[in-house]
């Protein structure tokens, strides 16, 4: 599914404006300036792209395009939102994905586990990721040595301001890209919400301002030389490339599924000393994350709950709500906690 926005200043002169900045010149006027928002459903990546493109086209005199691609509407499913900008008098492609981005904004740090998240980043590009202070995921070493790497605690700021991470990221983006007129972006952000959620306008503005100032630029993170390769243009096994007879040569993939990105701040943590191994958590868990083993010989139980495989846990917390002994507790997810406590469900396959 996708939606597109494209226009030019000439075509939008009748639209209301509160603020008209001087003409904007992009860093490389002869090229496109491209931003890719990498996210999961529910964090506002599509709205962020829409706001950025609207501000650029309607208020800053650029030509621009925006569209998003997303799969099922399920919470936690992957979303990519693309914004392409150029001078007001240059033509632009409206709905082609951004494969060589100048900026990548990663809404959930767990997305960095997939190389597709930062694929195509230019050597002089910028990667902005969402994490509290002190968290530098090791995957960032795959970035270009010369790229700018920026951390901002978008989730933490958004929670504090009763806003969403997208408002924070837009503020950070404006601080890092001086050609973006911050007042134009802020006006577009406020207008996006003024109709349906007027109560959110002030909170979004506060989150935007915090995003402008509360970020950290990291040095010496990336190690790669030059631009990163873009995402593979063709699926490995597509219409033209699949083996004769439509055989799927790889086994079913529910074991490889990784729902880590679906958790937004909370995870269940087991206190074995309180567990009575009743299995209620297993009954309510929609993703079969609970890992069971043989109980001790001669003990009270036949089967024993060993823990949670967080690879498959989407953080719905139904297990916590259902546990009769409070052996499972709702716990704030800090960096590395899930990896430390994870009990593998298929240790022979994914240790
Ligand atoms: S519901 Fe609670 S007590 Fe029962 S097995 Fe699960 S964690 Fe243990
Ligand atoms: S929070 Fe609990 S019920 Fe929900 S997916 Fe994770 S283990 Fe299963």
Image: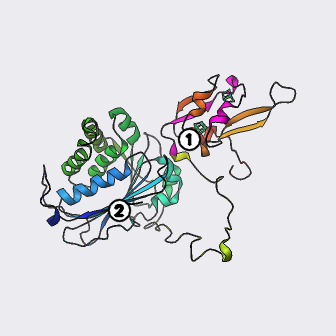
Q: Position of residue 181 (x, y in %)?
A: 20, 53
Determine if residue 317 is in view. yes
Residue at the (46%, 51%) spot, across then down: 73
315 left or right of 302 in image? left
Which of these two is toward me, 41 or 82?
41
Specify the label residue 102 is tagged with. Answer: 2
In-front residue for pair 316/170: 316
| Residue 278 on the magenta segment | yes
Picture coordinates of residue 5, whole percent (x, y): 28, 61
Side of 167 where 242 appears, left or right: right
Q: Give the residue pinned by disc 1.
A: 336
In the figure, 79 relative to 229: above or below?
Answer: above
Spatial CA distance of label 2 from label 1 is: 29 Å
Mark 1 Cα within 10 Å, few/some/many (few <14, many 20+)? few
- Label 2 C-beta lies within 8 Å of the nearest ligand 2 atom: no
Percent coordinates x, y for residue 71 in the rendering: 48, 56
């Amino acid at each position: 599914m996708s939606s597109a926005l494209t226009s030019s200043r000439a075509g939008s002169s009748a639209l209301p404006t509160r603020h008209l900045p001087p003409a904007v010149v992009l860093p490389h006027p002869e090229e496109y300036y491209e931003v890719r928002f990498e996210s999961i459903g529910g964090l506002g990546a599509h709205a962020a792209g829409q706001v950025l493109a609207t501000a650029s086209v309607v208020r800053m005199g650029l030509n621009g395009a925006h569209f998003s691609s997303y799969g099922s509407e399920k919470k936690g499913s992957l979303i990519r939102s693309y914004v392409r900008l150029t001078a007001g008098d240059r033509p632009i492609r409206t709905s082609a994905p951004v494969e060589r981005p100048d900026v990548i904004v990663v809404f959930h740090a767990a997305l960095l586990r997939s190389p597709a998240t930062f694929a195509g980043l230019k050597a002089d590009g910028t990667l902005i990721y969402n994490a509290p202070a002190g968290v530098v995921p090791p995957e960032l070493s795959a970035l270009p040595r010369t790229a700018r790497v920026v951390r901002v605690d978008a989730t933490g700021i958004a929670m504090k301001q009763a806003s969403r991470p997208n408002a924070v990221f837009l503020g950070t983006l404006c601080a890092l890209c001086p050609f973006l007129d911050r007042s134009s972006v802020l006006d577009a952000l406020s207008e996006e919400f003024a109709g349906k959620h007027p109560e959110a306008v002030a909170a979004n503005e506060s989150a935007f301002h915090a995003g402008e100032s509360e970020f950290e630029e990291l040095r010496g993170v990336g190690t790669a030389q030059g631009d990163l390769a873009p995402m593979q243009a063709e699926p490995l096994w597509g219409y033209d490339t699949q083996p004769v007879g439509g055989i799927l040569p790889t086994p079913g993939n529910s074991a490889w599924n990784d729902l880590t990105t679906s958790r937004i701040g909370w995870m269940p943590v087991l206190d074995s000393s309180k567990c009575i191994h009743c299995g209620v958590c297993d009954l309510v868990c929609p993703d079969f994350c609970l890992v069971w083993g043989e109980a001790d010989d001669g003990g009270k139980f036949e089967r024993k709950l060993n823990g949670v495989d967080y690879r498959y846990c989407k953080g719905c917390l139904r297990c916590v709500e259902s546990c009769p002994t409070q052996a499972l507790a709702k716990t704030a997810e800090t960096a590395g906690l899930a990896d430390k406590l994870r009990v593998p469900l298929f240790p022979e396959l994914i240790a």
